Image: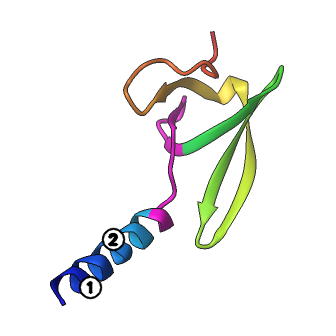
Amino acid sequence: MKIGVRLIILLCAMIIIGLEPLYCETIYTKDGQQIQAKVTEKTEDTIWYEAATGDIIEEIGIDMIEVEKILNDDGSISEYSPR
């Protein structure tokens, strides 16, 4: 009985943790915004990142000139950060 209850609690916790979006970077814009996102690509003039709106995950682009810096979740500078 105790093992069954513990197993159910563990499974519920895993489901809840799995539903939260996992972000790797924080994008700091020159106008003061902080965007928690997973950066997917950096082109010559655009940084592309994934953002979750409810159950929908969409890819959004932001102009490189609008970005001040991008930091990883551990505080180090992201490889996608403008130089």
On the image, the x and y values in percent for residue 53 come to 61, 66
Residue stretch in magenta: 18-36
On the image, the x and y values in percent for residue 61 come to 75, 41
Q: Does the magenta-highlighted stretch encompass residue 33?
A: yes
Task: For the N terminus, give its image quadrant.
Answer: bottom left
Closer to the N terminus: mark 1 or mark 2? 1
Residue drawn where x is 30% and y is 77% of the image = 7
Residue drawn where x is 81% and y is 24% of the image = 45
Badge 1 marks a residue whose secondary structure is helix
Q: Is residue 15 left or right of residue 59?
A: left
The vertical placement of 34 against 76, above or below, is below
Crowd class of label 1 (few under 14; some 14 to 19; many from 20; radius 10 Å): few
Most foreground residue, 13 or 41: 13
Q: Residue furthest bottom?
A: 1
Q: Does the magenta-highlighted stretch encompass residue 72?
A: no
Q: Any mark on residue 81, and which? A: none
On the image, the x and y values in percent for residue 42 come to 75, 26
Q: Any mark on residue 13, and which? A: 2
Crowd class of label 2 (few under 14; some 14 to 19; many from 20; radius 10 Å): few
In terms of image quadrants, where is residue 51?
A: bottom right
Type of amino acid under label 1: Gly
Type of amino acid under label 2: Ala
On the image, the x and y values in percent for residue 37 come to 56, 45
Q: Number of marks in the image?
A: 2
Badge 2 marks a residue whose secondary structure is helix
The vertical placement of 2 against 44, above or below, is below
Residue with the mark numbered 1: 4
Most foreground residue, 65 or 21: 21
Whether residues under marks 1 and 2 lie with C-beta atoms below 8 angstroms apart, the answer is no
Viewer-nearest of labels 1 and 2?
1
In terms of image quadrants, where is residue 73?
A: top left
